[in-house]
Each structure stands twice: as structure tokens, then as C-alpha cells.
């Protein structure tokens, strides 16, 4: 392992860039919970971050992305994060676009689909693709 002390987001970004090819797992102690790490560091898909941070509020992307971000917090710690449906529902409803009243009967099944395991991964992949497109 390599221990790299950092002061500030620029140091964290620099340290990550220097070590991302050598390591797959990164442990962040007392930093990283309150920013969207995937947006800031733009890691490869196989990079995994373990975050042990007391700073609040915790970024919602970190809470709901359990593939690359592992939050190490107490189970009884109230993060004050809204439910997944409250945060991401608007994006999905805009994509539907039909607005038919007959769709209301199937609404509960639509809500269940939003909570499938791949929903977060698809959203993150869309964000990653958008970042790559904007970088061109």
C-alpha cells in the first residue's frame, strides 16, 4: 500500500492521478464524502473508493453508487439524504413523455423498476459519457 497525505481537493486529485494506474482500491480518511468523487476524479470503472469521512452532508451520488463508492459509516448515522425516488424521479418521468392517464395504473410497477440494481450504474454511465463528450 501507499499512504499519501493530502490537503485540499487539488492534492487529492493530483495524488489520485499519480497512483491510479498502480492501484484499484483507494481508502479516503476524513475526506471525499461530501463531493461527487466520480465527477471530480473521473476514475476508471474498476476503481473502488472506501470513504471514512465525518464531514456532512454526504453527496447523494456517493450514497446511491454502491459499485465504486463504499461509505464506511455507522448504521445508525442519519445522513439526511432523500430517498432515491425523490432525487431521481424527475429525470425518469421526463424520459417517458407520454403523459397518458391510462399509464397511471402501471405507475407502481414503474416505480419498482426505478429501484433496480442497474439504475444507478446507467445514470453514472450517462454522466460519464456526457463528460467524455464535453471533453472533446
Image (cartoon, rainbow, N blue to C red):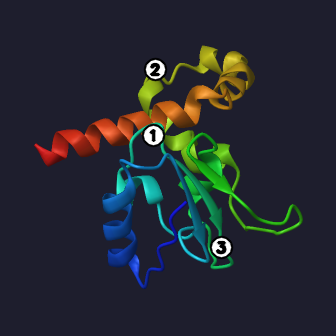
Counting from the top left corner in percent of width and height, residue 9 is at 38, 76
Is residue 61 visible in the rendered structure shown here? yes
SS state under label 1 = helix
Whether residue 54 sits left or right of residue 15 in the image: it is: right
- Judge the density around disc 3: few (<14), some (14-19), many (≥20) Cα neighbours within 10 Å: some
Q: Are marks 3 and 2 in contact (CB under 8 Å)?
A: no
Tell me the distance, in whole angstroms, between the alpha carbons under discs 3 and 2: 43 Å
Q: Earlier in the sequence, mark 3 or mark 1?
A: 3
Residue at image point 62% right, 14% down: 102
Determine the residue located farthest toward the right in the rendered image.
76
| Badge 2 element | loop
Q: Nearer the viewer, mark 3 or mark 1?
A: 3
**Callout 2: 10 Å neighbours few (<14), some, many (20+)?**
few
Q: Which residue is mark 1?
A: 124
Q: Nearer the viewer, residue 91 or 107?
A: 91
Q: What mark, if any, has residue 98 been given in the picture?
A: 2
- Report the front residue among 114 and 23: 23
Foreground: 116 or 65? 65
Alpha carbon of mark 1 to alpha carbon of mark 2: how far? 25 Å
Q: Residues within 10 Å of mark 1 (few under 14, many from 20)?
A: some
Kindly report the distance in space between the C-alpha atoms of the residues bearing marks 3 and 1: 22 Å
Query: Which residue sits at x=47%, y=73%?
Result: 4
Disc nearer the start of the sequence (1/2): 2
Q: Are marks 3 and 1 in contact (CB under 8 Å)?
A: no
Q: Position of residue 124 (x, y in %)?
A: 45, 40
Q: Is residue 55 left or right of residue 112?
A: left
Relative to 79, is 30 above or below? below
Circle 3 SS class:
loop
Q: Which residue is mark 3?
A: 53
Amino acid at each position: 500500500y501507499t499512504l499519501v497525505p493530502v490537503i485540499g481537493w487539488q492534492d487529492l486529485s493530483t495524488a489520485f492521478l499519480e497512483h491510479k494506474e498502480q492501484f484499484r482500491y483507494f481508502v479516503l480518511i476524513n475526506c471525499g464524502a461530501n463531493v461527487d468523487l466520480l465527477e471530480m476524479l473521473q476514475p476508471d470503472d474498476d476503481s473502488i473508493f472506501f470513504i471514512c469521512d465525518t464531514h456532512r452532508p454526504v453527496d447523494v451520488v456517493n450514497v446511491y453508487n454502491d459499485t465504486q463508492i463504499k461509505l464506511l459509516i455507522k448504521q445508525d448515522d442519519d445522513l439526511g439524504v432523500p430517498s432515491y425516488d425523490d432525487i431521481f424521479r424527475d429525470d425518469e418521468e421526463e424520459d417517458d413523455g407520454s403523459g397518458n392517464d391510462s399509464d397511471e395504473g402501471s405507475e407502481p410497477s414503474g416505480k419498482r423498476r426505478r429501484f433496480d440494481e442497474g439504475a444507478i450504474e446507467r445514470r453514472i454511465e450517462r454522466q460519464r459519457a456526457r463528460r467524455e463528450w464535453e471533453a472533446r
